[in-house]
Amino acid sequence: MVASISVPGQAHWSSKAAFVLAAVGSAVGLGNLWRFPSEAGANGGGAFVLIYILCVALIGAPLLLAETLIGRHGQRSTVGSAKLLARQSNASSGWAALAVIGMIANYLILTFYSVVAGWVLYFIWTSGADVARTVAAGQPFAGAYADLTIDQVRQQMPDLFADPVKMSIAHFIFAAATTFVVARGVKGGIEVAATWLMPAFFVLLLGITVYAGITGDFAAAVAFLFTPDFERALQPQVLNSALGQAFFSLSLGGGAMVAYGAYASRDTNLGQTSGLISAADTSVAIIAGLAIFPIVFSVGLTPDAGPTLMFQTLPAAFHSMPAGALVAFAFFVLALFAALTSSVSLLEISTAYLVERFKMSRTLAAGLLGGGFFLIGMVSVLSFNVWADHRPLALVPGFTNANWFDVFDGVTGRILLPLSGLITAVFIGWIADRKLVDEETGLKSGPLLPLWRFLVAWLCPIAVFLILLFGLFPQLIS
Ligand code: PFF
């Protein structure tokens, strides 16, 4: 029966802590572990980190408050909540288009997010088998994949990419797990997953960071992450990547935070929780950097490997580290926990919409959507092998060389999320009834409310407009 009452307007988190944990679970994901370090590595380390923190504080956190308040006010699906607020503000319900664009964007993100999470599952499998082998051999503290040469360890990722069957199985298992959690409902599924997996995630992350600090080159990592090169920091490319990363990492633009806000109780102070969620997500990104880079530097590898950092550079590093086998396994388990608590928030948005709009049971809605995103995700799976030569948007500037996977990632991250974030900022900053909005923020007295209003009404739209522009016309900044 849990499932049937998990309808927006009727379902609630069991406590404020559960809301914060679920929202942090949504924010903390592969974006922190896989995307942040590779973006930081590719964009000069300290320069990127500095701009990223500014983006989170000045744009991300204020928008997070704007999103959660739309949800909490409406207590409906993201589309329903946006419509309601528009209506109550005597504005056109066309403003709900923001939620529709966001919902589509997040559904498309889910299709490739699940594929990447499938890679994580595959590495849990191989590193788990490796732990079993080292333990059986009486050497539990051996390096990872000690029976392989370093080249063979690095070859695991290209081999996986060349194998659509393995990738699809892993993608399927992850898609099924995501669907299962969402089908079980807000309290019985999403909240349970967040309250078990997030604390386990934090313990594992701290453990690996301490390990990295002891066995790795911590000083080099600190220097890399915290020495800003100001000339580099102001390059449009760095600004663009940092803002895009802030959106992705805080789960903004697509409505995940609207969806979770809809289940928050009236006495939750959204101003406070938005600050807390943003701070927690950013801390995890930086701690993840402090866990990953010392390991990468200690074996003389370079930090700018990009998306292969987590699946190629890191396993190669664990190869020669003490207890590398155990730590590699722990690392991928941690990444899986983070990915699952994020993917459920991606699926929740469209599930809540179908339940509300078509009075469908939650199980049916999640099942249909789950099957759908698995199938669409297959396009991304095949883009690494069978369709590796396809360039679907070859004629579109900025996408000339993009395969299907890059198209899904690029169209959502560079266009749809910022677009929907831009509309949200304009909607909350200019259109929505001021009194209704201000009451929801919890920022009652002091300078915070006017500051927040300024950031949402002015800084967010202008800055987000710029990412959108550079996302569409990258040649403007090159
Ligand atoms: N914030 C997640 C991460 O950092 O991995 C990804 C994400 C989740 C993006 C939910 C968007 C979203 F709605």
Image (cartoon, helix red, strand yellow):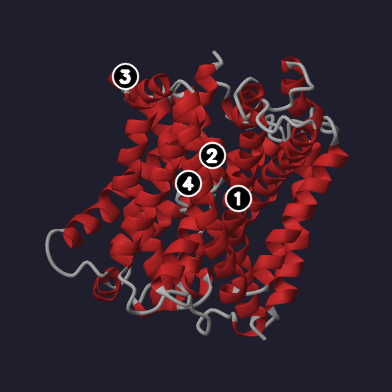
Direction front: furthest residue: 138
Q: Amino acid at mark 2?
A: Leu
Q: Amino acid at mark 1?
A: Ala
Which of labels 2 and 4 is toward the front? 2
Q: Are marks 1 and 3 in contact (CB under 8 Å)?
A: no
Q: CA distance from mark 3 to mark 2?
A: 23 Å
In the rendered image, which residue does mark 2 sit on? Answer: 33
Mark 4 CB lies closer than 8 A to ligand 1: yes
Crowdedness near tag 3: few (<14), some (14–19) or many (≥20) residues, C-alpha within 10 Å = some
Residue 229 disc label: 3
Q: Are marks 2 and 1 in contact (CB under 8 Å)?
A: no
Crowdedness near tag 2: few (<14), some (14–19) or many (≥20) residues, C-alpha within 10 Å = many
Direction left: furthest residue: 446
In the rendered image, which residue does mark 4 sit on? Answer: 249
In the rendered image, which residue does mark 1 sit on? Answer: 339
**Mark 2 or mark 1, earlier in chain:** 2
Q: Is residue 348 visible?
A: yes
Secondary structure at numbered mark 4 = helix
